[in-house]
C-alpha cells in the first residue's frame, strides 16, 4: 500500500509537470539503439509441415530503457525522466497495486492504467514526460511476461464497459466521467479512454477538475500508457498521435529512426 500511495502522489507531480512543462525531474539519456525482437524460430510438427514462431521476447529493464522514443523517431521531441526509485515512480520494476486500493474494485484496471501500471508485476518499467510542438504526455512503459501483457489490455477493456467513477487510496482521490473513446490505438492491441480527476488544492474550496486522456497500446509483451491532461489554456486534452506512432514503431521494429 505504501508503494502504491507513493506512486500516486508522485504521478500527481508528473501531472503538474505536464501543465507547467518539465520541471527538473531529470533528463533521460537515450542510448543509440532499442532492443530488437528475437526472430521467429521454425519448429517442426509431427507432420513435418507445420511451423510456429518463437514466443515474443520480453524486454529487460535495460532494453526497455533503450526503447523509449527519442528525437531520432520524432523531430523536435523533448523528454524528461520522472522519478528515481524501483518501487516508486521511475525506471525499475514496480509492484502491482492491490485491487483494494480502488473503490469499486471493478475499476482497478482503469485506476492502474491512470498510474501507468497494472495488477501484474512487470519485468521492467520506465516513466517519462515526452512530446513536441504538437503536445506533451506522460509515457509509462512496462514489459511483461507474454500472457500478462495480453491480460493488462483485456482487463482494462472489460473494466471500461462498466466503470464510470472511482476513488483511490485512503484519501479517496476521486475520478469520474470515465468513458472509452474511439481514439485509434496502434501496436498489436490497445484501448483509449478519458476521465476527469478531482484534485484538492489549498487555493480552492472545491476540488479542481482535471480532464485527462489516455491511450494504451500493447506491442508484443510491452504495454505503453500515454497520458495527457488539460493545459493552462483549458484545451481539451489529447495524446499526440505522432508520439504514439513513433513509440509504436520503435517497439515493433526494435530500432530507432526506422522508416
Image (cartoon, rainbow, N blue to C red):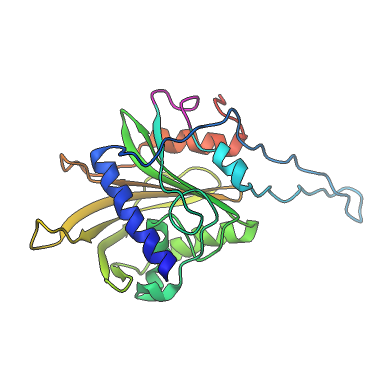
Which of the image's four quarters has the N terminus?
Answer: bottom left
Residue 183: x %, y % from top left: 37, 46
**105 sits left or right of 35 in the view:** left
Quick check: 197 above or below 26? below
What is the quadrant of residue 174 in the picture? bottom left
Quick check: 1 above or below 62? below
What is the quadrant of residue 82 in the picture? top left
Task: Tell me the residue at 64%/57% (across/down).
Answer: 145
Magenta-span inclusion, residue 94: no
- Residue 88 or residue 198, whichever sits in front: 88
Residue 160 in sight: no
Residue 122: x %, y % from top left: 57, 57
- Residue 108 or residue 183, whichever sits in front: 108
Q: Mostly what secondary structure, the magenta segment?
A: loop
Task: Tell me the residue at 17%/41% (across/down).
Answer: 232
Task: Tell me the residue at 21%/59% (across/down).
Answer: 199
Residue 83: x %, y % from top left: 42, 48
Q: How many marks?
A: 0
Task: Tell me the residue at 31%/28% (across/down).
Answer: 133
Q: Which residues are magenta?
A: 70-76
Residue 186 in sight: yes
**171 sits left or right of 128 in the view:** left
Residue 62: x %, y % from top left: 61, 43
Which of the image's four quarters has the C terminus?
Answer: top right
Amino acid at each position: 500500500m505504501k508503494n502504491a500511495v507513493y506512486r500516486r502522489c508522485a504521478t500527481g507531480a508528473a501531472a503538474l509537470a505536464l501543465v507547467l512543462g518539465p520541471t527538473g525531474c531529470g533528463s533521460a539519456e537515450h542510448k543509440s539503439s532499442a532492443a530488437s525482437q528475437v526472430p521467429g524460430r521454425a519448429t517442426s510438427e509431427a507432420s513435418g509441415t507445420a511451423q510456429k514462431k518463437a514466443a515474443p521476447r520480453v524486454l529487460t529493464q535495460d532494453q526497455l530503457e533503450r526503447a523509449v522514443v527519442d528525437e531520432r523517431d520524432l523531430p523536435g521531441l523533448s523528454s524528461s525522466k520522472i522519478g528515481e526509485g524501483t518501487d516508486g515512480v521511475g525506471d525499475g520494476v514496480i509492484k502491482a497495486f492491490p485491487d483494494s486500493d480502488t473503490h469499486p474494485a471493478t475499476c482497478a484496471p482503469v485506476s492502474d492504467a491512470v498510474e501507468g501500471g497494472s495488477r501484474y508485476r512487470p519485468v521492467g518499467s520506465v516513466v517519462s514526460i515526452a512530446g513536441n510542438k504538437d503536445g506533451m504526455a506522460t509515457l509509462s512503459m512496462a514489459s511483461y511476461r507474454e500472457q500478462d501483457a495480453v491480460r493488462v489490455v483485456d482487463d482494462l477493456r472489460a473494466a471500461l464497459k462498466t466503470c464510470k467513477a472511482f476513488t483511490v487510496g485512503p484519501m479517496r482521490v476521486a475520478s469520474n466521467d470515465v468513458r472509452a473513446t474511439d481514439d485509434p490505438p496502434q501496436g498489436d492491441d490497445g484501448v483509449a479512454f478519458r476521465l476527469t480527476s478531482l484534485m484538492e488544492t489549498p487555493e480552492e474550496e472545491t476540488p479542481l477538475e482535471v480532464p485527462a486522456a489516455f491511450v494504451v497500446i500493447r506491442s508484443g509483451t510491452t504495454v505503453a500508457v500515454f497520458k495527457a491532461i488539460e493545459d493552462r489554456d483549458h484545451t481539451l486534452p489529447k495524446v499526440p498521435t505522432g508520439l504514439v506512432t513513433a513509440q509504436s514503431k520503435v517497439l515493433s521494429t526494435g530500432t530507432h529512426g526506422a522508416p
